[in-house]
Image (cartoon, rainbow, N blue to C red):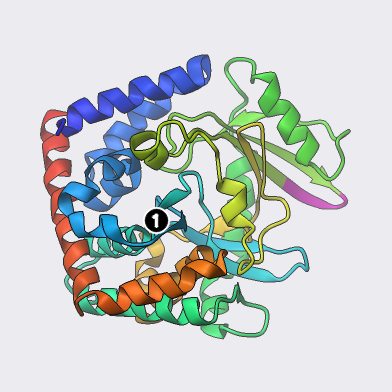
Amino acid sequence: MTTILQSAKAYETWMRTQLGADLDESDLDKKYKKMKSGGFVFLRATYWRWAETIFDICPDLASAPQVLAIGDTHLENFGTWRDDEGRLVWGANDFDDAAVMPYALDLVRLTASAILARNDADLPPRAIAEAILGGYRRGLKAPSPVILERDYKWLRNAVILSDAERKAFWDKYRDLPPPAKPVPTPYVEALRRSLPDEELPFVAKPRTAGTGSLGRPRFIADVEWRGGPVIREVKALAQSAWSLRHNPSDTMIRTAVIASGRARSPDPRYQVTDNLLVRRLSPNSRKIEVEGDAQILLSPAMLDLMGLEIANCHSDDASCVPGILADLDKREVDWLRNSARAAAAAISMEQAEFAMKG
């Protein structure tokens, strides 16, 4: 097995072949700095490494039934949006690395991320795993989007921003500096097509966000339309790191496929065209982060819903569900906790090595 330093360099080289001059060098520097800060952030930043190593850490996961899965699953891969009916929805909101893989990997990666993010006062690993697995089983049997308009009052109250937070949200994007160099035409045109009025004037501004996707170009359009602000974001997509490792000939980007599955109520402004993802940004269309919301994200009720939402994604093909349930029934009681603890320990070791030598 290659070392983490060798692996990071190889993946960076591959990204250069994919993005060429569009690769954001300054973002790469930020990514490597973040990778030195702790295990949870390291996991978020290194999905390609997870794809390389997880079967060495947990070989028994390789035999689990395969589904179209999220891939880069973790605590911060969940948030809110408005669906086609204007309803507030919560669920998974980042599918950049979606690919066909054993279903168990999404569960193990989410549980490992919670173990890495927890403090001593938070739920123990067994309780984390039980909450996630309980929600997952429930979701497989009765998949359903998490709509916050009538149900889940506790979650609706937790995700609605205050007036001050909403103002800060809009100001953050309005205060972004203009680009230092011309923005490539495909990104500008994708933003233009996504606006409610394509004739609206705007300046495409570069934006730094995320962790695993740092280095990929990302731009926003911030406009005024009919009395209020509108923001769209475009970012480059590439072959899933899972496919790159396990099936290199499979270059299909499945981001839009999994996002619009039968058990989800997607954001109609979440669109993929020509390997570019365009989405709406607003106080109602955002991810929920560990910093500031750790108590919510690590609660039993939220972990249960995360498990349910993974099931929503996995059950798009209903014929896969019986095989998944049968596989779950065969596994030992603590399989998820044990697998996630092993993965978290391996990630912590590599993060320490990277922090020391990277």
The image shows a total of numbered marks equal to: 1
Most common secondary structure along the magenta stretch:
strand
Query: Quarter holding the N terminus?
Result: top left
Q: Nearer the viewer, residue 75 or 346?
A: 346
Task: Give the residue at x 38% y 42%.
Answer: 242
Asked whether residue 240 appears in the rendered view, the answer is yes
Give the magenta part as a residue range: 226-230
Q: Is residue 64 magenta?
A: no
Q: Position of residue 223 (x, y in %)?
A: 77, 40
Q: Is residue 227 magenta?
A: yes
Asked whether residue 124 appears in the rendered view, the answer is no
Q: Is residue 264 left or right of residue 239?
A: right
Rendered position, 36 above or below 332: above
Q: Which residue is mark 1?
A: 73
Q: Nearer the viewer, residue 249 or 106?
A: 249
Q: Amino acid at mark 1?
A: Thr
Rendered position, 196 above or below 107: above
Task: Give the residue at x 45% y 31%.
Answer: 249
- Near mark 1 (Cα within 10 A), the count class, few <14, some 14-19 or many ≥20, is many
Q: Nearer the viewer, residue 100 or 10?
A: 100
Mark 1 falls on what kind of element?
loop
Q: Position of residue 136 (x, y in %)?
A: 41, 75
Q: Is residue 194 left or right of residue 93?
A: right
Give the quarter of the image for residue 182.
top right
Query: Quarter holding the C terminus?
Result: top left
Task: Give the residue at x 88% y 33%.
Answer: 199
Q: Position of residue 94 (x, y in %)?
A: 51, 51
